[in-house]
Image: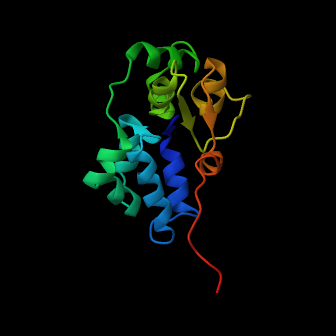
Amino acid sequence: MLYLLDANALINAHNGWYALNRVPEFWRWLLHHAEAGTVMMPAETYGEVETGNDDLAGWMKQADTKRLLRLTEEADPAKVQAVLTKYGDNLTEDELITIGQDPFLIAAVFGHADRIVVTGEVSRSSKTRAKRKVPDICNDLGVPWRSPVELIRELDFTTGWDQP
């Protein structure tokens, strides 16, 4: 199975419980799974994180991180368009900016039985157009998705800390 990460999965991890300087084993674990081919990010969502100016962006800019974690396949324009239709018809430029790179993430999983979206977004089925959330678009398209916590459980992340 290949888990494809939304930018928010890494941003929330770094800004929350798994900061690079506090839980470095999480980030090594992530690269281990990237090297094994089980965790990656489409180039578009990778770029959302890499363009920042914090420690996480610095980590994402490292050659080894990029080589292991970034999915190198090109986005399928037809699949991206199919995803965009689930947001609504005749989307404005402002709406496309609000939607961001999420359609590329979902399109990278759409039609692949061996792939899963991992997003920190929470379903909000009452939202419409550009305010729709990744889980709701995935549900509409039959695309499997998980939360980052579910990813951590499924791939069994643990720390090596022992109590004194």
Q: Relative to residue 3, is residue 162 drawn left or right?
A: right
Q: Is residue 30 left or right of residue 151?
A: left
Which residue: 63% across, 20% down? 142
In terms of image quadrants, where is residue 78?
top left
Residue that protrudes farthest toward the bottom in the picture: 164
Of all residues shown, which one is farthest toward the left?
A: 63
Residue at image x 34%, y 46%?
68
**Most extreme residue toward the right, as rendered?**
126
When the figure is inspected, residue 158 is found, relative to residue 70, above or below; the finding is below
- Seen in the picture, residue 142 relative to 63 is either above or below; the reply is above
Viewport quadrant of the C terminus:
bottom right
Q: From what the image shows, is residue 94 above or below residue 86?
A: below
The spot of residue 132 in percent (x, y) is 62, 29
Q: Position of residue 113 (x, y in %)?
A: 55, 22
For the point 59% across and 62% down, which residue is it?
158
Res. 133 visible in picture: no
- On the image, which quarter does residue 135 sit in? top right
- Quarter holding residue 130: top right
Which residue is at a point 45% across and 65% down the rendered structure image?
A: 20
Give x and y (percent) for residue 148: 60, 47
Q: Between 37 and 60, which is closer to the camera in this rendering?
A: 37
Looking at the picture, tell me which residue is in the foreground, 101 or 155.
155
Residue 107 as seen in the image, left or right of residue 86: left
Q: Nearer the viewer, residue 67 or 16?
A: 67
Q: Is residue 129 visible?
A: yes
Q: Nearer the viewer, residue 40 or 88?
A: 40
